[in-house]
Amino acid sequence: MLYCLDTNVFFTPSNLYYPMDFSPAYWDMIDKHIEDGSVLILDQVYQELTKGESAVTEWIKERKDEGFVKKFHDDATQKEYKKIVNHVAAGGYRPEVVADFLSGADPWIIAACKAHHLVLVTKETYSTSKKKVKIPNICKEFEVEYIDDFELIRRLEAKFILES
């Protein structure tokens, strides 16, 4: 199984519960699965992750040429992207909410996951609110499997064990 990681799978853990300075196991786990090819990010996510300066930004930049960053600009992905755009535009969201969603990597991640049967990993949760277009809502509409980072850890059978 291939897992496509959303931007928030890096920044949220780094800021809240797996800071790079005292929880290297999370980052080592990601590295291990970069090496075996089971996790990836889209080039659009790479662009989001490398804006500004942070430990995560530097960490991501160091891995750019390891096959971790993928480009899905193929016809199948573009076809799914157009379907997502049309769905969101007709979905009852305010125009600025639609524009915000379409300006980022989210619709491309969903489209690539749909077209290439990838599992999308995100920290976003399903919501009935129309204040923001949420990845899980669109994934459900397009039958794209999505999980959070904790489920990713379980599926990859990672164990964060204190060294003795």
Image (cartoon, rainbow, N blue to C red):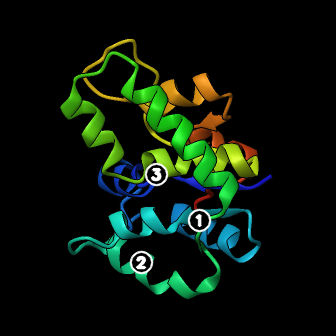
Q: Which residue is mark 3?
A: 9
Image location of residue 111, percent across then percent down: 59, 46
Q: Residue at x 25, y 41 (%)?
A: 100
Q: Residue at x 33, y 40 (%)?
A: 101
Residue depth check, mark 1 versus mark 2: number of the one nearer the observer: 1
Mark 1 burial class by Cα count in 10 Å: few <14, some 14-19, many 20+? few
Assign a secondary structure to mark 2. Answer: helix
Q: Which mark is residue 59?
A: 2
Which badge, 3 or 1, comes first in the chain's sequence? Answer: 3
Assign a secondary structure to mark 3. Answer: helix
Image location of residue 83, percent across then percent down: 55, 36
Mark 3 → mark 1, Cα distance in angstroms:
23 Å
Query: Looking at numbered disc 1 in the image, what kind of residue is underneath it?
Result: His
Towards the viewer: 51 or 161: 51
Mark 1 → mark 2, Cα distance in angstroms:
25 Å
Query: Looking at numbered disc 3 in the image, what kind of residue is underneath it?
Result: Val
Image location of residue 133, percent across then percent down: 36, 29
For the C terminus, the quadrant is bottom right
Q: Is residue 126 visible?
A: yes
Query: Looking at numbered disc 2 in the image, what kind of residue is underneath it?
Result: Trp
Q: Which residue is mark 1?
A: 73
Which badge, 1 or 2, comes first in the chain's sequence? Answer: 2
Do residues under tags 1 and 2 come within 8 Å of each other at their CB atoms?
no
Towards the viewer: 14 or 49: 49
On the picture, is 96 further left or further right than 134?
Answer: left
Q: Quadrant of residue 53?
A: bottom left
Assign a secondary structure to mark 1. Answer: loop
